[in-house]
Amino acid sequence: MTIQHGPDTGLEGHYAGIVTRLVAFVIDIITIAVIFAIGGQVIEYLLSVMLRHSVELREASVAQYIALGLWAFVYFAHPLAASGRTFGMAVVGIRVVRTDGSELGTRRAIVRVLALPLSFLLLCFGFLLIVLRGDRRALHDLIAGSAVVYAWDARAARLRFLARR
């Protein structure tokens, strides 16, 4: 993949920058937290109805952290394996592909999600690679053999917008 700049080039297929990736990640973290909280409330309600007494899952803190970790893993791994993008990535118009541009696949999606915490180690050095490397790959991308690219043609979107005027 080659990065081209200029007024006549779109962004589709070009490496995504750190700001776009950060915005997608923040959207994903908020989505994970909101869905987990709502799911917890629904489970508490259903258990309270079935057991006929009040159930509060907040009392089981270790189990809650394990459940949150499993939910976050599934939230990231499943959509990456199925479509190459999470909800946050879809909102900002990026997706994860193999380094040759082909679909990510299940095995690489799982490896990428499992390697994600490594990018947070040593003062987030793994994410600093996005700024330092020309191909904008973080540590977890290098481990999984993946790259994050823009998944929409900015020039075509601009032309469609101008055509509506």
Image (tube, grey):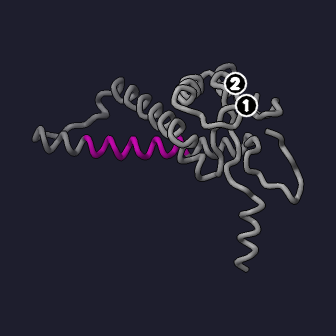
Mark 2 lies on residue: 142
Residue numbers of the magenta segment = 28-43
Picture residue at 62% right of the left edge, 21% below the top: 118
Quadrant in which the N terminus is drawn = top right
Quarter of the image where one finds residue 26: top right
Picture residue at 79% right of the left edge, 33% below the top: 135
Magenta highlight: main SS: helix
Q: Are marks 2 and 1 in contact (CB under 8 Å)?
A: yes
Give the crowd class for mark 2: few <14, some 14-19, many >=20 residues within 10 Å.
some
Q: Does the segment drawn in magenta span residue 158?
A: no
Q: Position of residue 110 (x, y in %)?
A: 52, 27
Q: Position of residue 13 (x, y in %)?
A: 73, 45
Question: How far separated are the C-alphas under marks 2 and 1?
Answer: 6 Å
Mark 1 lies on residue: 137
Spot the residue most to the bottom.
165
Instruction: Determine the secondary structure under disc 1.
Output: loop
